[in-house]
Amino acid sequence: MDTQTDALRVIENATCTFCGCVCDDMVLKVQGDRIVEAKNACVLGKAWFLNHHPEERPVAVVKGKPASLDEAVEQAAEILVNARYPVVYGLSDTTCEAQRVAVAIADWIGGCVDTTTSVCHGPSGMAFQGVGEVTCSLGEVKNRADLIVFWGCNPAESHPRHMTRYSTMPRGLFVPKGRKDRTVVLVDVRRTKTAPAADIFLQIKPRKDFEALWALRALIKGVPVDPKLEEETGITLTQWQDLAERLKSCKFGVLFFGMGLSMTRGKHLNVEAALALARDLNQFTKFYIKPMRGHGNVTGADNVVSWQTGYPFGVNLARGYPRFNPGEYTTADLLARGEADAALIVASDPLANFSQPAREHLLRIPYVALDPKETPTTRHATVAFTTAPYGISVAGTVYRMDDVPIRLRPALPSPYPSDEEVLRRLERRIRQLLGIGSETGTLISGQP
């Protein structure tokens, strides 16, 4: 006979935090300590929910040995306070509430704060500052867009519900026939699984995105373009002219771009060209542009760091005011040059994806890691905290890829503390060690 604990529970309108779509229409069925069904979830979302189960791990580990939460917080605080050049990194897979505290910690210890944006859409963040972003919500895309351009991204595999829920398939207020009312264009260097869903597929030569985008800008403005463009981009001038006319004549167009644009030759210059193209098109029609963000709350990390420092990532707070300089203050570069002497890593796994010099240096310095699961980074951490997974066991706020904030509805209790709870304890102890009053934010001695 089922006990009350094992009774089937249904969580309506739960939120999937696997990718930047942050779909908030999940219907989760929970039995005991497991999610047994995730209705409306895509294949990635189902894996996120159904494969989650509590692990028998200590709440904290200090130098390879299990420790209490208080002991671990004490050790972590001492590591960060005694560092001369600490860095706070990660943040894209946790709540905005936890991100705020992490930024505060970076400020108190005079370190750098950086997010995973610096190794994916960092060039996009730089381009937004230089050109600006003509933006809209995914709800507007669903209800209005009659032309969708995917450039350097593969949503069929990376964001499976993007096309069915937001961009190409859904019926909207001004596109009542859904897919039949839309033209879908894919521009990429290879034929991906998104290609069969597109009306037009342009396979450009690798590393030629900048040239292609500037040619489109010229065609939009009526500037003659050399027919040798085909040799440069792999696409005929006639095809580019056809695309330019489609871009100008649509009623509501959107260009979604991915890391195939932001992390190839040209980087932020590529994104600047795409942003400028969207801006130019507004002389003829309504046209918008959005990056395809990967991690569940990486957009929230950009927002939180931006509203607290003025910059989205790679921010140095050592002088008491924020300084922004990608390449100098971004974590992968700091570690590769051997400059950082301590780190606080929140919901990220740099040992699995950073360069070899960066990984080697991280292993040489003391660092603190917070993560719901065991990773190479938590295994080698001086202090590692096991935390509850956000969205599944922790409530809070996350941002969808279109900068729309969404509240989380957790489905399962967790024996572990949230990232926010651990970080708040850590911040409180850091302030005590630094002699900073908790009420006024001033030194206990009375000095500012």
Image (cartoon, rainbow, N blue to C red):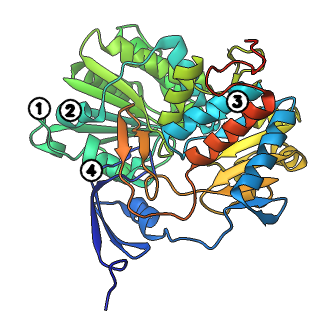
- The foreground one among 18 and 159 is 18
Among the 4 quarters of the image, the one containing residue 182: top left
Label number found at residue 174? 1
The answer to whether mark 2 and mark 3 are in CB contact below 8 A is no
Q: Position of residue 343 (x, y in %)?
A: 78, 40
Q: Is residue 367 left or right of residue 173?
A: right
Disc 1 residue crowd, few under 14, some 14–19, many 20+, Cα 10 Å = some
Per the model, the C-alpha gap separating discs 4 and 3 is: 40 Å
Q: Of discs 4 and 2, which sits in the foreground?
A: 4
Secondary structure beneath dot 1 equals loop
Q: Does label 4 or label 2 sit earlier along the sequence?
A: 2
Q: Which residue is mark 4?
A: 164
Of labels 2 and 1, earlier in sequence is 2
Mark 4: amino acid: Thr
Secondary structure of residue under mark 3: helix
Image quadrant holding the N terminus, namely bottom left
The residue positioned 46% from the left and 62% from the top of the image is 48
Q: Which residue is mark 3?
A: 106
In the picture of the structure, the residue carrying the numbered disc 2 is 146
State how far apart marks 2 and 1 are (Cα).
Answer: 9 Å
Give the CA separation, mark 1 to mark 4: 17 Å
The single residue placed furthest to the front in the displayed view is 445
Element type at mark 2: loop
Badge 3: residue crowd in 10 Å (few <14, some 14–19, many ≥20):
many
